[in-house]
Image: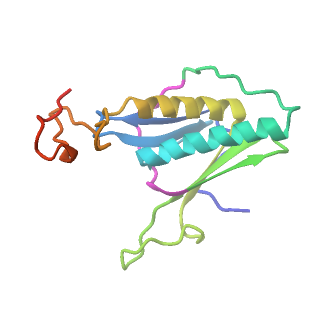
């Protein structure tokens, strides 16, 4: 059995969220189990990939196990708890399904550097990790909230695909022949 810093099994609530202004946001995964509150920091793309992957897993489970009740698409009122003190920045995320318990698990492993400033392989035992186990309903709600939060970011330039800052954006694809885009 793996050795986790925290094993939140089962979580009372779990949320993937962000704090800060678009362009300066910090994305994180936070869960509570009893008196334990754990937050870990992720990149925006990691939150998006996590949400899409878990939703795909839920879809596959419903196809493979038609006897399972479908997970409703209900927005639960889960909010970030403050102060938000992250345990670590995530270097690796793994998802899976416990068929016996009908629970989805997420394992977050820290991004750790050795003395030579090289990233330590996340499979090593000395890399801190946290396991989050939640119901399919909790995980669906977490994913839908995460995708909503991601969509609230800065608008994207239709020409180059880079974010448009509040102060404006000069698109390199215009080759200097257009005015900067300002929202």
**Image: 70 above or below 87:** above
Tell me the quarter of the image containing the N terminus.
Answer: bottom right
Viewer-side residue, 174 vs 88: 174
Q: Main secondary structure of the magenta part?
A: loop
Coordinates of residue 34 in the picture (x, y in percent): 62, 36
Residue 82 magenta: yes
* Residue in view at x 42 percent, y 48 percent: 43
Residue 142 image-quadrant placement: top right
Q: Is residue 35 visible?
A: no
Coordinates of residue 16 in the picture (x, y in percent): 50, 37
Coordinates of residue 145 in the picture (x, y in percent): 52, 29
Residue 132 magenta: no
**Image: 23 above or below 106:** above
Is 50 left, or right, of 24 in this rendering?
A: right
Tell me the quarter of the image containing the C terminus.
Answer: top left
* Residue in view at x 36 percent, y 42 percent: 26
**Image: 140 above or below 8:** above
Is 102 left, or right, of 138 in this rendering?
A: right
Q: Is residue 151 visible?
A: yes
Q: Which residues are magenta?
A: 78-92
Its colouring scheme is: rainbow
Residue 152 image-quadrant placement: top left
Coordinates of residue 66 in the picture (x, y in percent): 86, 33
Kindly give the residue lying farthest to the bottom in the view shown. 116
* Residue in view at x 35 percent, y 33 percent: 153
**Image: 173 above or below 22:** below
* Residue in view at x 85 percent, y 38 percent: 65
């Amino acid at each position: 059995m793996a050795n986790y810093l925290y094993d939140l099994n089962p979580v009372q609530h779990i949320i993937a969220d962000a704090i800060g202004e678009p362009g300066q946001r910090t994305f994180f995964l936070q869960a509570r189990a009893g008196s334990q509150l754990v937050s870990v920091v992720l990149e925006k793309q990691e939150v998006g990939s996590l949400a899409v992957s878990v939703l795909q897993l839920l879809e596959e489970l419903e196809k493979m196990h038609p006897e399972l009740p479908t997970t409703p698409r209900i927005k639960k009122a889960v909010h970030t708890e403050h102060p938000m003190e992250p345990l670590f920045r995530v270097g690796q995320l793994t998802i899976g399904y416990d068929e016996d318990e009908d629970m989805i698990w997420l394992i977050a492993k820290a991004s750790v550097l050795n003395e030579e400033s090289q990233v330590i392989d996340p499979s090593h035992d000395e890399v801190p990790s946290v396991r989050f186990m939640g119901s399919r309903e909790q995980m669906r709600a977490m994913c839908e909230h995460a995708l909503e939060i991601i969509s609230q970011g800065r608008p994207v330039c239709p020409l180059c695909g880079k974010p448009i800052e509040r102060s404006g954006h000069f698109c390199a694809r215009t080759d200097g022949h257009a005015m900067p885009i300002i929202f």
